[in-house]
Amino acid sequence: MKIAYIRTSSVQQNLDVQRETVTKFGVDKIFEEQVSGASTDNREQLKQALDFVRDGDELVVTRIDRLARSVRDLQNIVHELEQKNVKLVCTEQPVDTSNAMGKMFLDLLGVFASFERTMIKERQAEGIAKAKLRGVYKGRKPKVEASRINDLKEEGLSISAIARELNVSRKTVYNKLVA
């Protein structure tokens, strides 16, 4: 049986191209989600796909970076697939984990996916820093004003009581008291 896993990093992105590609490849079932690939945490459809595959199945992805953005996650997934005797198939990259050269190529693709993820994070941080300098990026609107926390503190409420009263974490209360 051919089982596909497709993913985009956010709900603003479209799964149509990946869906069309794996459908043409002849998959029997598709697991899809729109969540960051930075880690395998919170990727319920990936977990379901890995639980679903059985001995002799093929797990189909369009590209390795759709499966994992870290070398460790990729190796863990490949190991789990090997333990289940499930073949990993990539529609756009020549992945063959049945020989040493293919495994090396897979690891290289994982390194490139990890590198790309790091570059994305660096560019994002640079963009935010530049936007802050221009006064464009202000971050999220505060959930609670520091003055309100200070008022409650002056009334004699404890940190925990303030946090409960304002429905925020104790860390937020501490941070606002320092600010």
Image (cartoon, rainbow, N blue to C red):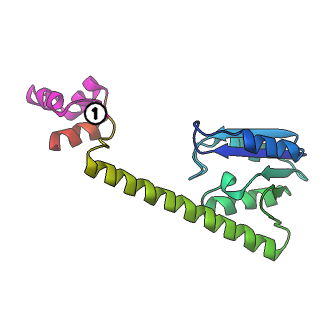
**Residue 63 as seen in the image, left or right of residue 133:** right
Pointer 1 local density, CA inside 10 Å: few below 14, some 14–19, many at least 20: few
Magenta range: 141-167
Q: Magenta residues: mostly which secondary structure?
A: helix
Residue 105 lies in the magenta-colored region: no
Q: How many marks?
A: 1
Residue placed most toward the observer, 175 or 116: 116
Which residue is found at the position 74% from the left and 61% from the top?
79
What residue does disc 1 label? 142
**Residue 153 as seen in the image, left or right of residue 42:** left
**Which quadrant does the C terminus fall into?**
top left
Which residue is found at the position 68% from the left and 70% from the top?
108
Q: x%, y% of residue 90?
A: 79, 57
Q: Is residue 141 above or below residue 95?
A: above
Task: Report the residue that reaches farthest toward the bottom.
Answer: 100
Q: x%, y% of residue 14?
A: 66, 39
Which residue is found at the position 91% from the left and 46% from the top?
1
Residue placed most toward the observer, 177 or 92: 92
